[in-house]
Image: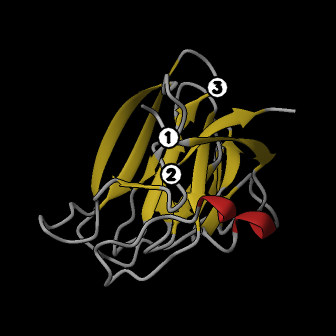
Amino acid sequence: MNTAHRSVLAVEKLSRNEFQPFGTAVLEPQGSPTSSGEGFECWFGCGTLNGLDFQLGQVIAQKPPGGITRMERHDHPELLLPISGAVVQVVAPRGDFADLEDCPDGAAARAFLIEPGEAVLIDSGTWHAAAVPIDEKTLYYFAAVPDEPGTAGGAWMPFSGQQRFELSFD
């Protein structure tokens, strides 16, 4: 018997201010480029990955048939970059990282639309679901540090109220 409470989560357009409690939104460049040359302009320093031993991963995302029911978190930031289409990143505020039983707060969860050419740098400890594609399937890249077995990082946990979220694009 499925006792999960179904909720609808409105998808928000990505903005620096609204995403700030969860990390850094990297949007279209603003201001003068940090360098330029023949055929290019470069804006360097959009976000920081703290010099850790990051590895690049690829995900072919498909819409979860049962909605979003679990999230994970890490003790390091994670970069997410959509490649072949837009994705929705669901996040929830950090909890007590030392508590291995801590769960994401579904009442505080938010969903952000990330278009190709945009990215998010998710802060350490921030709860996040796997990105959900707008279309049937979408490729996205992520950069993260592999989690140590037996730690809170990388453990997929249900929402505190056993919520199951569907996304709304209204």
Q: Residues within 10 Å of mark 1 (few under 14, many from 20)?
A: few
Question: Does 18 sit above or below residue 69?
Answer: below
Total labels: the figure holds 3
Give whichever of 37, 143 is nearer the camera.
143
In the image, is 18 to the left or to the right of 49?
right
For label 2, the residue is 162
Where disc 2 sits, the SS reads loop
In the image, is 51 to the left or to the right of 2?
left
Residue at 23% x, 68% y: name it.
53
For label 1, the residue is 3
Give the Cα distance between marks 2 and 1.
8 Å
Give whichever of 47, 130 is nearer the camera.
130
Foreground mark, 1 or 3? 1
Q: Which amino acid does label 3 sit on?
A: Ile
Q: Furthest residue to the top?
A: 136
Q: How crowded is mark 2: few (under 14 residues within 10 Å), some or many (20 or more)?
A: some
Image spot of residue 168 (x, y percent)? 77, 34
Give whichever of 116, 160 is nearer the camera.
160
Residue at 55% x, 15% y: name it.
136
Q: Residues within 10 Å of mark 3 (few under 14, many from 20)?
A: some
In terms of sequence position, does the residue under pointer 3 or pointer 2 come before the other? 3
Indicate the quadrant containing the C terminus: top left, top right, bottom left or bottom right.
Answer: top right
Question: Does 9 sit above or below residue 41?
Answer: above
CB under 8 Å between callouts 2 and 1? yes
For label 3, the residue is 134
Give the Cα distance between marks 1 and 3.
27 Å
Q: Furthest residue to the left?
A: 149
In terms of sequence position, does the residue under pointer 1 or pointer 3 come before the other? 1
